[in-house]
Image (tube, rainbow, N blue to C red):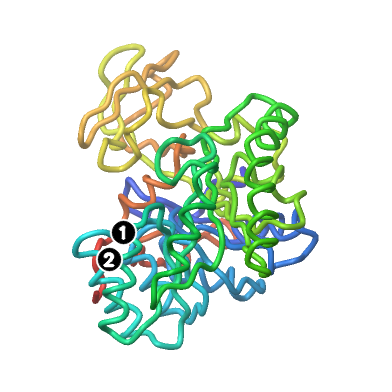
Amino acid sequence: MNWFEITNAETVDSPALLIFKDRMEQNIQAAINRLEGDVSRFRPHIKTNKTPEVCKALMQAGVTQFKCATIAEAEMLAQVGANDILLAYQPVGPKINRWIALQQRYPNAVFACLTDNKLTATALANAHAAANLTAKVYIDVNNGMNRSGIDVNKVAALVNQLMQLPNLSIIGLHVYDGHIRKQSAAERKAASDAAFKPVDQLQQILQQQYHRVFPIIAGGSTTFDAHAQRKNVICSPGTFIFWDAGYQQLMPEEPFEWAAVLITRVISIINATTITTDLGHKSVAAENPLPRVKFLNAPNAEPIAQSEEHMVVKVPDSSQYQPGTLLYAITIHICPTVALYNTLQVVENHKVVGSWKVVARDRFIHI
């Protein structure tokens, strides 16, 4: 029996997302091993899993600090007892009030967020002052991603300005270099080293000026290996927990295993070389061009079209299939795929034994 096959498939409606618990746990250990067991340098991003049970598994492995992308994800972490939570996002508008309310609801957790400008930082400081709280922030540093953050050469001046604000404390620096996607590990490390060098120099300048350490949280999945080799960096990958076909193709040398598998069934035979499955846009992340999945038990099957509830697939011989045939697939991008499911089906010993609710796929929990 192949590792991805389940023996009680007749009890699982499709499409569904299976989580192979043993592989997930192996991925957690592989990530910690990369940091030589030093979990103080590990702040995993939970945007991929969004699930309490997965976060608890990380905590059981010794993880004490987390990173997230939404206030709902932050609240989910607080609910499971995480005590160090970084919102890797800059709250503006009503999100600032939600951020304050979150801290008030969960006073035992330490919350921090990002900022990259004085205007937003001032709004954060004022809102926290009104609530008798101190805003804890990391400066979001742009070292080439060009999605958010302040240019590395302007950080020192911003830090000087923000140091004057009451009710605001600068904890450290945050750097995301997801734009580095070279085809070899050596190329990725070289690109990451070059992009990180001015950040490293910045950290030294700030520490000399303010006589304190400014911790750096850096990288994601593509530069995890490079940043793990820097003793002054806290690493925050997320996809490692489940892995996917996109990263496996880009980084085949990585130690992580596929732990999340989609199941889908054939629902129609179109002609001699075309079948249709129930794996539509609503069931797999659709931001990438086709093919959006890789079929494990049908390696020659090629997705050629997709709509909300259907995926049309070209196959060498459709007579090998019939309505109801079960296919197993790995998604190209797992993170937004997880967000499409209310529950994850948990597999142990080739059998679905229960389900985990994807609590933080919602934008709101209580706050």
Q: Is residue 49 above or below residue 125?
A: above
- Describe the element under mark 1 as helix, strand or loop: helix
> Is 144 positioned to the left or the right of 183 in the image?
left
Q: Nearer the viewer, residue 81 or 5?
A: 81
Q: Is residue 328 above or below residue 156?
A: above
**Residue identified by numbered label 1:** 120
| Disc sitting over residue 28 in the figure | none
**Residue identified by numbered label 2:** 123
Q: Nearer the viewer, residue 214 or 63?
A: 214
Instruction: Find the distance from the CA under tag 1 to the CA under tag 2.
Output: 5 Å
> Is 315 positioned to the left or the right of 57 in the image?
left
Amino acid type of the residue that numbered disc 1 sits on in the rendered structure: Thr
Quadrant in the rendering for residue 2: top right
> Is 295 positioned to the left or the right of 233 in the image?
left
Q: Tell me the residue at 36%/83% (across/down).
A: 133
Amino acid type of the residue that numbered disc 2 sits on in the rendered structure: Ala
Where is residue 85 drawn, in percent x and y? Answer: 48, 71
- Describe the element under mark 2 as helix, strand or loop: helix
Q: Tell me the residue at 53%/46% (across/down).
A: 176
Q: Tell me the residue at 72%/35% (across/down).
A: 253
Q: Nearer the viewer, residue 118 or 171?
A: 118
Quadrant in the rendering for residue 60: bottom right
Where is residue 110 drawn, in percent x and y? Answer: 47, 79
Quadrant in the rendering for residue 21: bottom right
- How many other residues sit within 10 Å of disc 1, few (<14), some (14-19) or many (≥20)? some
**Residue farthest right in this picture:** 36
Residues at circles 1 and 2 in contact by the CB criterion of under 8 Å:
yes
> Is 310 positioned to the left or the right of 331 in the image?
left
Q: Nearer the viewer, residue 15 or 164?
A: 164
- How many other residues sit within 10 Å of disc 2, few (<14), some (14-19) or many (≥20)? some
Viewer can see residue 1 = no
Task: Tell me the quadrant of the picture where the N terminus can be found.
Answer: top right
